[in-house]
C-alpha cells in the first residue's frame, strides 16, 4: 500500500510538470494555431533563471579566513553575507523561490520577443513549417545556454527547511515510514495553483472570455472590432511565463542542463495530442494521467515482468487512445484535420 501511494504521489508531481508545459502548448496552439516546438526550451530557460538568480545572490569576494591561524588563508564569501549577515545567508538559501522575481519578467519578455520577432510570420503557414522553424529556434536557445552555462547539470538546491522529507504516513494514518520529499509536495501544490489560476483567468475575466472566443472562432471575434492579434500576443507571453515558472520550480528536482527542455517537450507534446489538440482541460487531465502511468510503470515489480516498459508506456497509451479516439480525450472536431 505504501509503495502504491508513493508512486501515485510521484506520478502526480511529474504529471504536474507535464501538465504545465502542455497547458502552455495548448494555449499557443488554441489561440494562434501554431505548433510551438520551442516551448520546451522555455521550460529550460525558466530553470536557468533560477540558476542565474542563485549565481547573482552568491557573487562573492575573497576574505581572510580567521578560522585558520597557523598560516594566512582566504575564502570566498558572498557579498550578501558580508552586508546582511544571517539575513543574507537566508536570502541565498531561498534563491529558488525568490527567483520568481527574475523569472516572470524575463520569460514574459522572451515570449513576447519570440512571438513578435518570429512566430507571427508563421501564423498562416503549414504545421510542418511551424514545427521546423520552432524546433530550430529551440536548438538555437539550447546552444546559447550551453555556451554560457556549460553542458553539465547545475545543482540548484531547495531551501534547507524543505530539503528533507515530509511524514505523510503519519498525517494520513498510514505507516510512519511513509515519507515523501517536501519540495516535490510543494511542486505539486504549485502546479495545481498555476493551473487553477490560468483556468480562473480564462473563465472569470473579460480578457479570458475574448481569448476563449478567439480559440473557437478567431475571424468572428476580429469582426467585432476586437484586436485579437494583440491579445493573442499577450497569451503567448503568458504561456512562456507558465513554462518558465514550471522550469524554475523543477530546478531542485532535476538539476538544469541545456537539453532538459527537449526531454520534457517530447513527452508534453504527446500529452497535448492525447488530451486533444486545443483542449486545455484535456492537456491537464492527460498530463496527470500519463505522469501517474509512467510512475507506476517504473516500479521494479512491473519492470521485472515487462523490462523497459517505463520508457515506452506513455507512447503505448498514446497509440491506443489515438486509435480509439483520433481527436484525443477531449479534442474538438476540425482541429488539425485540414
Image (cartoon, grey):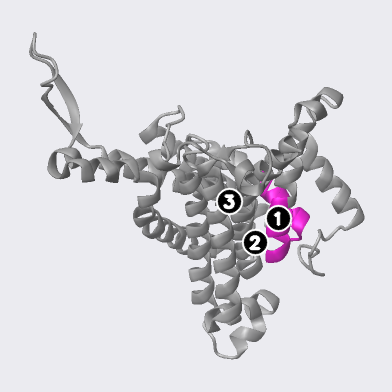
Of pointers 2 and 3, the one earlier in the residue sequence: 2
Whether pointer 3 and pointer 1 mark residues with C-beta atoms closer than 8 Å, the reply is: no
Q: Which residue is mark 3?
A: 188
Q: Secondary structure at mark 1?
A: helix
Which residue extends farthest bottom? 224
Of pointers 1 and 2, the one earlier in the residue sequence: 2
| Rendered-image quadrant of the C terminus | bottom right
* Residue located 57% across and 78% down the image: 208
Q: Secondary structure at mark 2?
A: helix
* Foreground tag (3 vs 1): 3
- Give the vertical position of 147 relative to 244 (above or below): above
Residue stretch rendered in magenta on the structure: 267-288
Q: Which residue is mark 1?
A: 272
Taking the magenta stretch, the answer to whether it contains residue 275 is yes
Decide if residue 311 is on the left or right side of residue 49.
right
* Foreground tag (2 vs 3): 3
Q: CA distance from mark 1 to mark 2?
A: 7 Å
Whether pointer 1 and pointer 2 mark residues with C-beta atoms closer than 8 Å, the reply is: yes
Decide if residue 44 is on the left or right side of residue 333.
left
Amino acid at each position: 500500500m505504501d509503495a502504491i501511494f508513493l508512486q501515485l504521489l510521484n506520478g502526480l508531481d511529474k504529471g504536474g510538470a507535464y501538465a504545465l508545459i502542455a497547458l502552455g502548448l495548448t494555449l499557443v496552439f488554441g489561440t494562434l494555431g501554431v505548433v510551438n516546438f520551442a516551448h520546451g526550451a522555455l521550460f529550460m530557460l525558466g530553470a536557468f533563471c533560477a540558476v542565474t538568480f542563485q549565481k547573482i545572490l552568491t557573487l562573492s569576494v575573497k576574505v581572510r579566513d580567521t578560522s585558520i591561524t597557523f598560516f594566512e588563508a582566504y575564502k570566498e564569501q558572498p557579498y550578501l553575507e558580508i552586508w546582511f549577515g544571517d539575513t543574507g545567508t537566508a536570502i541565498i538559501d531561498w534563491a529558488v523561490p525568490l527567483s520568481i522575481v527574475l523569472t516572470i519578467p524575463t520569460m514574459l519578455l522572451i515570449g513576447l520577443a519570440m512571438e513578435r520577432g518570429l512566430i507571427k510570420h508563421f501564423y498562416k503557414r503549414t504545421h510542418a513549417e511551424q514545427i521546423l522553424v520552432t524546433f530550430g529556434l529551440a536548438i538555437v536557445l539550447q546552444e546559447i545556454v550551453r555556451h554560457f552555462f556549460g553542458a553539465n547539470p547545475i545543482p540548484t538546491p531547495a531551501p534547507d527547511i524543505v530539503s528533507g522529507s515530509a511524514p505523510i504516513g503519519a498525517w494520513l494514518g498510514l505507516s510512519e515510514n511513509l515519507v515523501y520529499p517536501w519540495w516535490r509536495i510543494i511542486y505539486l501544490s504549485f502546479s495545481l495553483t498555476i493551473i487553477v489560476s490560468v483556468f480562473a483567468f480564462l473563465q472569470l475575466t473579460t480578457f479570458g472570455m475574448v481569448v476563449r472566443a478567439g480559440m473557437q472562432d478567431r475571424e468572428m471575434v476580429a469582426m467585432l472590432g476586437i484586436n485579437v492579434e494583440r491579445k493573442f500576443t499577450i497569451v503567448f507571453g503568458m504561456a512562456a511565463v507558465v513554462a518558465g515558472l514550471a522550469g524554475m520550480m523543477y530546478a531542485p528536482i532535476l538539476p538544469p542542463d541545456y537539453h532538459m527542455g527537449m526531454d520534457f517537450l517530447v513527452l508534453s507534446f504527446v500529452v497535448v495530442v492525447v488530451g486533444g489538440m486545443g483542449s486545455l482541460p484535456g492537456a491537464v487531465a492527460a498530463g496527470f494521467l500519463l505522469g501517474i502511468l509512467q510512475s507506476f510503470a517504473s516500479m521494479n515489480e512491473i519492470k521485472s515482468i515487462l523490462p523497459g516498459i517505463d520508457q515506452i508506456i506513455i507512447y503505448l497509451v498514446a497509440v491506443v487512445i489515438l486509435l480509439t479516439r483520433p481527436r484525443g480525450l477531449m479534442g474538438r472536431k476540425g482541429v488539425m484535420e485540414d
